Image: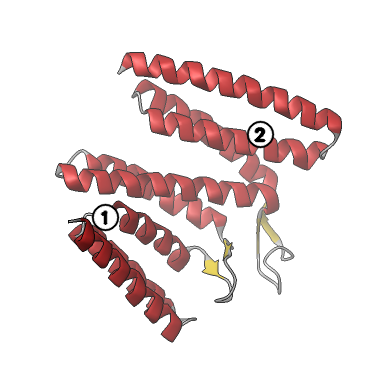
Amino acid sequence: MILAQTCTLMGVLLVGAAIIDLYPESVGALVAVTALLALFSLVARSGLLVVLATLALSVTICASSSEPHQYTLEMKDPSTTVILFSIGAFGLYQLSSRVPTDYRRLAILSARTSVFLVNAGFWVGSLWGERVERGSPWRGEVIIDERVYAVTWAIAIFTVAAWAWRRNLRWTVNAMAIFGGIHLFTQWFVYFDATPGTLLIGGLVALIIGMGLKKLNSRMGNMS
């Protein structure tokens, strides 16, 4: 069973890599690789493949990869990422309760990957906003200001965390806490820079958050 899973995974990844190598700038190639990953994630019931399929979908629709020798990913349209994958995460969560157990796990994994992508979109937007590309994607005319993203992201984090708390969804609560921390410290150092004082305060806040999160997890464990 393990050998079969390994061979399937290697085969899909090698075929996908070959398609991208043959057609490096083709949207059709990205669509084909995304479909390939999604199909075999269902056939092999592979969590890794379904996560890769979700990430590949984000590259196909909302982002662009860099040169073949560079391990980077550009997100030029964070609002599209946020909207589409928010819908996807909620839809997959609802779907997970209506499918057989093996596929429920895949739906949950894809939903969680979508949550990651939504927060990545918010993070990029909170730093640079959204701009019309003119040479460099970070130097064009501003469409959505970074402060709009920062405020909206904070509201979204608190809203989703409260929703997950009421449903005892521990993973989602922890994910929102992590991204809330990322958001907090990103804005903290953007506005106050890295000085001994800000580092000290940031460290103390991180300790408080960590202890609070530990207690929260214990309480949610008792609620299960």
**Disc 2 marks which amino acid?**
Leu
Mark yes or no: residue 118 visible.
Answer: yes
Q: Quadrant of residue 192?
A: top right
Picture layout, residue 47 above or below residue 11: above
Q: Position of residue 122 (x, y in %)?
A: 57, 47
Residue at (44, 21) in percent of width and height: 217
**Disc 1 marks which amino acid?**
Ser
**Mark 2 / mark 1, whichever is N-terminal:** 1
Q: Residue 184: which disc? A: 2
Q: Residue 46: which disc? A: 1
- On the rendered image, what quadrant is the C terminus found in? top left
* Callout 1 secondary element: loop
Mark 1 closeness class: few <14, some 14–19, many ≥20 residues within 10 Å:
many
Q: Position of residue 118 (x, y in %)?
A: 49, 48
Residue at (35, 46) in percent of width and height: 111
Taking the image as shown, residue 118 lies to the left or right of residue 76, namely left
Q: Position of residue 137 (x, y in %)?
A: 67, 66
Task: State the residue lying farthest toward the bottom.
Answer: 22
- On the rendered image, what quadrant is the N terminus found in? bottom left
Taking the image as shown, residue 165 lies to the left or right of residue 189, namely left
* Residue 65 or residue 87, whichever sits in front: 65
Picture layout, residue 215 above or below residue 116: above
